Image (spheres, helix red, strand yellow):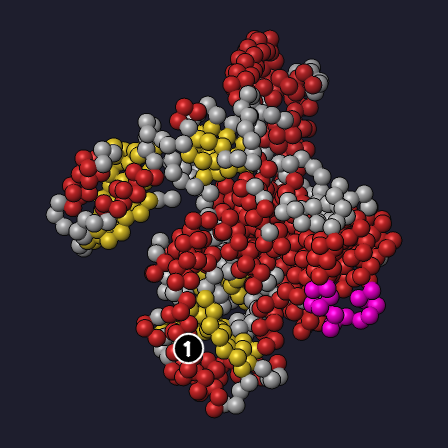
């Protein structure tokens, strides 16, 4: 254990002074003494311990505490908890020590931040679940955890490539959306950009370079754009600030992926923010619309791009008025109009929301959302990985606002159905829902609801949840309620099935012993007696021929024994073939043609081919499944089972061919299909599995499945096809 040098002691002291500068003006002398006490305690506890970068470990909790106060705006208890957040996990001190020195509340927050022990398949999801359980009691746990993740992302350079990939994937999957949901937009943006930097470094560097190259021209456009606005606003004697803001690297990259466009085709790179001050809160809305009027008197605006979040704020408290207008050189420019109060809520999220709204915040949509999360988490039977999926879905979703027949407002994720709305109101309403009247028009319960809809749920006592309802609902709450209904019904079926089996066995002078139950399980090809009771109770399995079954028991047992022996040998052989696989997780696993289907397989969900950016997932049989980095399944694995994920790198593939699909669109003409297929088969010597073209009113679209060796083959084909007269776009289906 290396002691701190004099230089390191000075660095630590400077970091602590920076922390104090960030919060000194808002805290009492007593609070500052508590922070000093926490620093001295934590510094001593972590003495001699270093981070991967080589710096003293105490620098990390100090940085987290600085983010917590400076960038989120939390107070003394949060600062102290941040300084202490790794003490229990990484040193010999216990939670009781924290409690006796700093009180129960700080100990509770530190406990929420301390990682769980457990099986690594579920460890990350379980940690996240534990953290969220504290959310409704004290949201500071989540806010500090986000600050902790932000500092880890800022210092990710010192980690191995495998760790960088795991941490950035997890951040993009859960922490960035969570920061967004809690209103921490600046932090959310930085988390996304840093995740992209480590997950897709080439794309990140390319977009960053293009932004830097166009910085001077962008600044010129901003100045030209705001000049006439300033002239008019100055005449209004309004105290304001106005500045340009460029889109983040991640948001540009995401738009390029979704819209299938190049960097130059991303039209809304420019954004302007106008922040005004000196206005009473009641007068803010009027002032926003006055500024909107000034802007739209100068520039033409896009009518479908007005976003009014001052009349109905977002669930996380965000308020602003957005409008997109046509600016200089035919460039679309988004203008965001906010008061200083709105801006602080936008930058600091939940913390500022509470500062301004105080006790009223208990009525906010954010608190209702937190309560729904707590409801889901408190179900002891809910699966942690399944919960993680549902939770992420609701983090990503944009909100819509709808109304009950009495005019009560409800906020739901975009894409919600009538059934989601019914469960949002009440469980019984959801279970008995048969449809709805939306704006007095009859619709089915699968109908997707829109913002502004007034919804009256229609019910029937005969209705009950069906299995296909899982495909209709999208909210975590509704999914859980449908599951609960099935569990209750299943429980009743189990009791009935058990009773029916006992009666049937009694009629055959048999008892429900382990031997007879196992015979029934094998006959029905089921894994557990609970499953069997449930299927018998629900009428899926008949017990009519139970007597005949036991007469044939001897022969059946012989067959089963043979089957088990055969299966056991096959499984053992597979495990022996893969059991000797060994590699260094810190280095990329090399993918070579001679090892395909022996040591690794290509995932069917994303169909990677040699040359794609890929990662590997180590399954329970020591076999590596290769996924594209962009695959949604891979993102889920990074977030929930990151320790099983490894980096992977292709060795040049030249022999085997891999299936890839391209889509071609353009203007129809005689001979264009022959020209396209000729380029693929003759010029590039590539086989086509399927070719499908449709043409209508002079426009065609084609879908082709090709056998290629690697991404170079597909890129060369796409490049050549793009030069064909009449072809407008060619893209690989990813």
Image: 286 above or below 142: below
Examine the rendering and report whether any part of residue 436 can be seen.
no
Where is residue 679? Give x, y as percent: 19, 40
Q: Viewed as shown, does residue 629 lie left or right of 38?
A: left
The residue shown at (41%, 62%) is 211
Where is residue 525? Give x, y as percent: 56, 22
Residue nearest the viewer, comparing 275 with 10: 10
Residue nearest the viewer, comparing 159 with 700: 159
The residue shown at (39%, 55%) is 256
Residue 262, located in which quarter of the rendered image? bottom left
Image: 241 above or below 75: below
Magenta range is: 17-33
- Quadrant where the C terminus sits is top left
Whether the magenta-drawn stretch holds residue 296 is answered as no
Where is residue 138? Give x, y as percent: 73, 58
Q: Residues within 10 Å of mark 1 (few under 14, many from 20)?
A: few
The residue shown at (53%, 87%) is 238
The residue indicated by pointer 1 is: 223
Where is residue 429? Give x, y as percent: 59, 55
**Label 1: element kind:** helix
Q: Residue furthest left?
A: 670
């Amino acid at each position: 254990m290396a002691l701190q040098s004099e230089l390191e002691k000075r660095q630590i002291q400077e970091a602590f002074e920076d922390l104090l500068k960030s919060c000194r003006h808002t805290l009492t002398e007593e609070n500052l003494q508590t922070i000093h006490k926490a620093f001295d305690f934590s510094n001593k506890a972590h003495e001699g311990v270093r981070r991967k970068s080589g710096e003293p470990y105490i620098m990390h909790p100090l940085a987290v505490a600085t983010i917590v106060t400076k960038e989120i705006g939390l107070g003394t208890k949060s600062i102290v908890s941040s300084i202490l957040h790794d003490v229990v996990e990484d040193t010999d001190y216990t939670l009781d020590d924290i409690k006796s020195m700093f009180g129960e509340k700080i100990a509770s927050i530190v406990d929420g931040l301390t990682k769980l022990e457990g099986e690594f398949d579920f460890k990350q999801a379980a940690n996240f679940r534990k953290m969220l359980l504290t959310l409704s009691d004290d949201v500071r746990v989540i806010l500090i955890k986000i600050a902790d993740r932000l500092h880890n992302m800022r210092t990710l350079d010192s980690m191995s490539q495998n760790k960088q990939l795991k941490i950035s994937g997890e951040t993009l999957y859960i922490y960035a959306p969570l920061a967004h949901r809690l209103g921490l937009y600046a932090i959310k943006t930085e988390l996304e950009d840093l995740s992209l930097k480590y997950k897709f470094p080439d794309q990140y560097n390319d977009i960053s370079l293009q932004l830097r190259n166009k910085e001077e021209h962008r600044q010129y456009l901003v100045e030209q754009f705001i000049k006439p606005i300033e002239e008019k606003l100055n005449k209004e004697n309004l105290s304001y600030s106005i500045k340009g803001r460029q889109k983040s690297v991640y948001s540009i990259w995401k738009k390029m992926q979704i819209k299938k466009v190049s960097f130059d085709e991303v039209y809304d790179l420019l954004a302007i923010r106008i922040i005004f001050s000196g206005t009473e809160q009641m007068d803010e809305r009027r002032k926003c619309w006055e500024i909107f009027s000034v802007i739209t008197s100068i520039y033409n605006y896009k009518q479908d791009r007005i976003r009014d979040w001052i009349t109905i704020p977002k669930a996380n408290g965000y308020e602003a008025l957005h409008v997109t207008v046509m600016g200089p050189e035919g460039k679309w420019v988004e203008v965001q109009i906010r008061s200083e109060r709105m801006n602080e809520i936008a930058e600091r999220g939940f913390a500022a929301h509470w500062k301004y709204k105080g006790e009223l915040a208990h009525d906010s949509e954010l608190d209702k959302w937190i309560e729904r999360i707590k409801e889901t988490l408190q179900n002891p039977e809910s699966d942690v990985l399944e919960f993680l999926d549902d939770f992420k879905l609701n983090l990503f979703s944009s909100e819509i606002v709808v109304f009950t027949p009495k005019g009560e407002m409800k906020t739901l994720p975009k894409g919600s159905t009538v059934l989601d709305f019914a469960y949002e109101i009440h469980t019984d309403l959801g279970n008995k829902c048969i449809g709805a009247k939306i704006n007095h028009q009859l619709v089915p319960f699968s109908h997707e609801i829109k913002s502004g809809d007034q919804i009256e749920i229609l019910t029937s006592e005969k209705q009950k949840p069906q299995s296909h309802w899982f495909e209709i609902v999208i909210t975590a709450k509704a999914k859980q309620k449908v599951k609960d209904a099935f569990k209750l019904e299943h429980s009743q079926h189990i009791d009935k099935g058990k009773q029916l089996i006992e009666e049937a066995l009694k009629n055959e002078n048999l008892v429900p012993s382990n031997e007879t139950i196992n015979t029934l399980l094998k006959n029905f090809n089921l894994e557990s007696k609970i499953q069997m009771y449930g299927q018998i109770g629900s009428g899926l399995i008949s017990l009519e021929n139970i007597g005949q079954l036991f007469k044939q028991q001897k022969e059946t047992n012989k067959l089963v024994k043979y089957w088990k022996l055969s299966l056991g040998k096959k499984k053992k052989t597979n495990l022996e073939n893969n059991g000797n696989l060994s590699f260094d997780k810190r280095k990329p696993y090399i993918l070579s043609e001679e090892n395909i289907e022996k040591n690794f397989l290509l995932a069917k969900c994303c169909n990677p081919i040699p040359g794609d950016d890929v990662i590997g997932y180590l399954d329970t049989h020591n076999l590596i499944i290769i996924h594209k980095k962009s695959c949604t399944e891979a993102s889920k694995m990074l977030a929930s089972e990151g320790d099983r994920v490894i980096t992977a790198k292709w060795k040049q593939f030249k022999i085997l061919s891999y299936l890839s699909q391209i889509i071609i669109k353009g203007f129809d003409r005689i001979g264009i299909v022959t020209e396209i297929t000729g380029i693929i088969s003759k010029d590039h010597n590539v086989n086509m599995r399927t070719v499908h073209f449709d043409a209508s009113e002079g426009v065609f679209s084609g879908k082709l499945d090709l056998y290629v060796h690697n991404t170079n083959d597909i890129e060369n084909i796409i490049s050549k096809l793009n030069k064909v007269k009449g072809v407008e776009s060619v893209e690989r289906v990813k």
